[in-house]
Amino acid sequence: MGGTGYTGADVAAEAVARGHQVASYSRSAPKTPVDGVSYTQGAAEDAVRLVPGRDAVVAALSPCGDLVGRLLGRYRDIAAAADAAGARLIVIGGFSSLRPAPGEPRFAEGDVPERFRSEAREMDAIREWLTSAAPGSLDWTLVSPAAGYGAWAAGERTGTYRVGGDVARHDARGGSEISGADFALAIVDGIERDAHPRAHISIATGPPDGPTPPRVLRGRVRVTSWRCRTRSAASR
């Protein structure tokens, strides 16, 4: 779902390169189709028709355009279809749903810049629904990227990544990054390994147990993974 967007296109390309059958659903046709991917266009409310017969569903939609205020409802429908089909549901969340440190409020609950606040909180509402109200039979995983993730910072494929929980991962310099290709690698690896059932995880580069530097925990934090934007934004 959202297979022609920044995340969805990378995931589709990674999956088909490994020999998987991949179907993409989005409201627009791809500018550069990936050989081997089956593309369908339509409204978000009709996306559920592609779910039956699938082993896994990757939901990479954003609360933008006509989905503002409606994304949670669409994801509930997709989740119900995935549950009925016995398919795994991989939801691509936002960095703002992570915590700066264990026990701290999530970024979306804090001082988010006004122009990004609605998107951050709508995405976090999906996290809250998955973790507290989703059917017990639903096999879901919520994946949050690093702060510096997006089309403005596509980066290069390194073939490595780090998996964490719901606490943001930073390197020794305070950076939090992941390339588009490495994020897609992590997603498809997780699907193939049936990893992280009913869990909220984060994906980033950096040392496996790198602590979050104290300067990131104080006051505001640099946030760049706003998925309805094409450029990064700093909230300092």
Image (cartoon, rainbow, N blue to C red):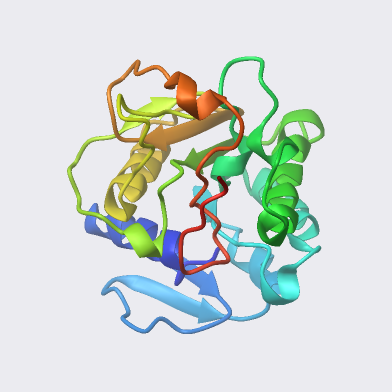
Please indicate, yes or no, whether residue 158 appears anywhere in the rendered image: yes
Q: Residue at x 66, y 15 (%)?
A: 103
Residue 134: percent from the left, percent from the top? Answer: 77, 36
Instruction: In the rendered view, tell whether residue 102 sits above or below residue 75.
Output: above
Please indicate, yes or no, whether residue 22 appears anywhere in the rendered image: no
Q: Nearer the viewer, residue 21 or 107?
A: 107
Left or right relative to 134: residue 193: left
Q: Residue at x 40, y 48 (%)?
A: 148
Residue 96: percent from the left, percent from the top? Answer: 61, 42
Would you identify the image quadrant in which residue 41 lies?
A: bottom right
Instruction: In the rendered view, tell whether residue 119 sits above or below residue 42.
Output: above
Q: Residue at x 61, y 28 (%)?
A: 198
Left or right relative to 152: residue 101: right
The image shows a total of numbered marks equal to 0
Left or right relative to 77: residue 104: left
Q: Nearer the viewer, residue 53 or 35?
A: 35
Residue 163: percent from the left, percent from the top? Answer: 39, 28
Q: Nearer the viewer, residue 124 or 3?
A: 124
Residue 5: percent from the left, percent from the top? Answer: 46, 69
